[in-house]
Image (spheres, grey):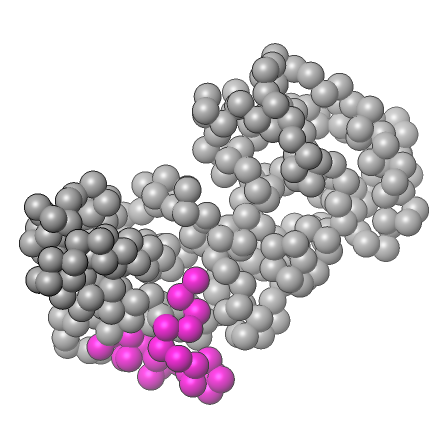
Amino acid sequence: MNGLETAERFYETCGKPMIDREFAQFADVIAAGLAGQGSECFGFDDEFSRDHDFGPGFILWIPERYKEKIGSELQRAYDLLPSETEAASGSIITPERAKRVGVMTTEQFYTNFTGRPTAPETNADWLRIPQRFLAEAVNGKVFYDPLGEFSAVRSALLSYYPPDVLKKKLAANCAAMGQAGQYNYVRCIKRGHYESAYLACCEFVKSALAALYLLNGTYMPFYKWAFKKAESFRSPEGSFERIKKLPGASDKTEGEKKIALIEEICLSVEKELVRRGLSDAFDDFIPAHAESLTKTIEDPFIRGLHITAGAD
C-alpha cells in the first residue's frame, strides 16, 4: 500500500468518524484529501521514501471563514488521532511533516503554491506561477469535498493553461532548447569545453522536458520527479526516449552522438508544433518555431515579453 492509499484509509477509519462524532454540524464544510509536497502525493513513494515523514496523514481543508470557528479545535482533534501504523514503523518524523498534513484553509493551501487563494484570473497570473508549484497544487487525491470549494479551484487549475500562456511557455522553452542545445552545446564540444558542455546539456534537457510536459497538458513537477512523471508521455513520438539517453552519455567521448540526439529531439518537437497548427515555420533551428509561436499570441502583454520569459 502506497502513501496515498494509506492516507485515504487513515481518513476513512479514523478521520471521518472523528469528524462525524465531534464536528457533525460542520461536516458539510470540511474537505479531506492529500496533495502538495511529498513523493506520496505524486504516488511515487517507495522503500527509499519511507525513512522520513512516512505514515498516516491527510489534510482537512476548511474555508477561511470557518477558521476562527473550528480551525484550532479541529487541529487538536486531528493531533489526537492514532499516529502509528505498521507502514510508519522506523520513519523519522521531521517538523516539516506538520506543515504538509492536518488542518488548512482552502485559501491557505492554494496561496502556498500559487500565491493566490483562488485560481489565476489573467494570463499574467498564470505565467508567473512555476510549473512545479502548479504540479503540487493539483497532485494527490481529494477524498471528500461536500462543499466543493476546494475542488472548484483544483478543477480550474487542472483545466491547464489558457491558450496564450501555453504558447508563451512553449515558445520560451523552444528558444531555450535552441540556445542551449543546438547552439551552445555544439560550440562547447568543438572547443573541448566539456564542463560547459555538461551544463548546456542540462539546460537543454530541462527545457526539452518542459516542452514535452506542455505538449502533453501536464504540469512539470520538481526536477526529482520530472523524468518519472513523463514516462507515460507518447507525444511527440520517441522524444522522451531520446531525452533519457542524454544524461548518461559522455560529453567528452560521445559529444557527436549527443548532438545528433539533440537535433532529433528538436525536430520531433518542431513537427508536433506544426502538426498542431501552433507553428508555420519551416526551419530545423527550433528558435524559429519559438518566434512563430510568439506571433500567434493575442495578449499584447504576453506577446511583448522576452522570448525566454515563462520558461519555468
Q: Is residue 131 magenta?
A: no
Q: Is residue 214 above or below residue 301?
A: above
Split into 4 quadrants, where in the image is the C terminus?
bottom left
Counting from the top left corner in percent of width and height, residue 278 is at 30, 72
What residue do we see at 33% from left, 84% from top? 295
Q: Is residue 309 magenta?
A: yes
What residue do we see at 14% from left, 75% from top? 283
Counting from the top left corner in percent of width and height, residue 115 is at 64, 62
* In this rendering, position of residue 214 left or right of residue 242: right
* In this rendering, position of residue 47 left or right of residue 203: right
What residue do we see at 76% from left, 49% from top? 105
Q: Which residues are magenta?
A: 288-312
Counting from the top left corner in percent of width and height, residue 54 is at 59, 26
Q: Is residue 168 above or below residue 64?
A: below
- The quarter holding residue 100 reads top right
What residue do we see at 89% from left, 36% from top? 73
Q: Is residue 290 above or below residue 65?
A: below
Front residue of 195 and 296: 195
Counting from the top left corner in percent of width and height, residue 267 is at 16, 63
- The quarter holding residue 184 reads bottom left
Query: Can residue 267 be seen from the camera position used here?
Result: no
Q: Is residue 118 above or below residue 108?
A: below
- The quarter holding residue 119 reads bottom right
* In this rendering, position of residue 273 left or right of residue 167: left
Front residue of 233 and 81: 81
Query: Can residue 177 be seen from the camera position used here?
Result: yes
**Total numbered labels:** 0
